[in-house]
Amino acid sequence: MNDYAGKTVLITGASMGLGEGFAHGFATAGAELILTARSADLLEAVAETCRELGSPKVTVIPGDVSIEADVAEVVEGGVAAHGKIDALINNAGVSDMRGVAPEQFDMATWNWIMSIDLNGAFMYLRDVGKHMLETGGGSIVNICSIMGHGANELNIIAYTAAKGALRNVTMQLGCEWADRGVRVNSVSPGFIVTEMVRPALEGMGMDKWIASRTPMRRIGELNEIVAPVMFLASDGASYITGHDLNVDGGTNASNGTYQIPPIHQEWNADTTPRVGAGYEGIQPRPEWYEAMKAGIPGIHYTPEG
């Protein structure tokens, strides 16, 4: 997984956040890189760091993923500069942080999100996929989201639609191209903190709230999403295709994770206590906990009665 010598990796949305993290990870592993995003200045800064980290060749090609001609220019320019593309990390994406309810959501914002998160992702899948089919194979990793798996009180209606669709596209193309040597997988991150968003999450206390509904009781770190993406793109995942990997601290495996610790875990504290301190919760226990301390009448009995 950690040896990408001789491989060329194209990363979209590479100028900041997760994309920058992916670029650093593949650079450290010795990959040649094709980096794209809208901002040439930010991309050049990322590229310089990647060279320092060990990438033998980094090509910067600015472009807008929602513009078909830009996508073609990036793919064609990347192939011309490196001779091939072995892996695509389809990462570029946007969302809407205004907090607009679905019944008030405007079509201009809907179309903007779709143009990048779904249409742009598909155009890169199509163009890079065609190149890989012509040259004998490759690996594509789409960056989806746990928001594309189901409802969530933090979700944005256009974002969940786009990411859910991209997950289905991953499965379709993963199977459709499997016999011709092109693997297509996706990673669905939970809440991942980068240095760009850390001050806001921690400053508003959102990190504690998000952790309270995550079984691992914390937000994910950047390296914890970079490593799974690098694995799926690598030859170590050569028999994996059409798969979506949740990297979410257990969120999607849970039917609900407590923010107020359940009282029943204390009913047998004197005889068979829970091992380990566990999670304390972020809210004080309500008054009705007092009535449940001794257990449910007729079902649970304390050692004394």
Image (cartoon, helix red, strand yellow):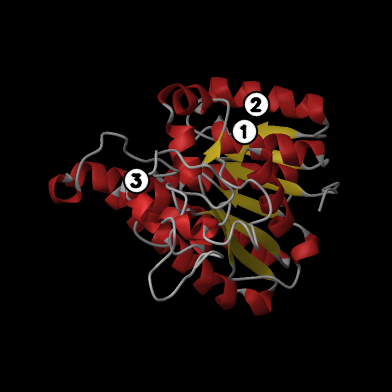
CA–CA distance in space, label 1 to label 3: 25 Å
How many marks are shown on the rendered structure?
A: 3
Which residue type carries mark 1? Glu
Q: Nearer the viewer, residue 169 or 258?
A: 258
For residue 191, side relative to residue 224 (left or right)? left
Q: Position of residue 238 (x, y in %)?
A: 76, 68
Q: Where is residue 214 in the image (x, y as percent from the top left)?
A: 51, 49
For residue 287, side relative to residue 2 (left or right)? left
For mark 3, does the 10 Å Cα neighbourhood hold few (<14), some (14 to 19), or many (20 or more) residues? Answer: few
Which residue type carries mark 2? Val
Residue 46: give its label. Answer: 2
Q: Which residue is drawn at 78% across and 34% down?
A: 57
Residue 34 in view in this figure: no
Residue 154: give its label. Answer: 3
Q: Is mark 2 on a helix, strand or loop?
A: helix
Residue 297 occupies quadrant: bottom left
Question: Which of labels 3 and 2 is toward the front?
Answer: 3
Question: Which of labels 2 and 1 is toward the front?
Answer: 1
Q: Which residue lies furthest to the bottom in this view?
A: 179
Q: Where is residue 48 in the image (x, y as percent from the top left)?
A: 71, 22
Q: Residue at x 14, y 50 (%)?
A: 103
Specify which label sits upstream in the sequence, 1 or 3.
Answer: 1
Question: CB of mark 2 within 8 Å of CB of mark 1?
Answer: yes
Specify which label sits upstream in the sequence, 2 or 1.
Answer: 1
Residue 186 in view in this figure: yes
Q: Where is residue 285 in the image (x, y as percent from the top left)?
A: 39, 43
Q: Which residue is drawn at 32% across and 49% down?
A: 153
According to the picture, the residue beneath numbered tag 1 turns out to be 20
Q: Nearer the viewer, residue 202 or 234?
A: 202
Q: Residue at x 54, y 24 (%)?
A: 40
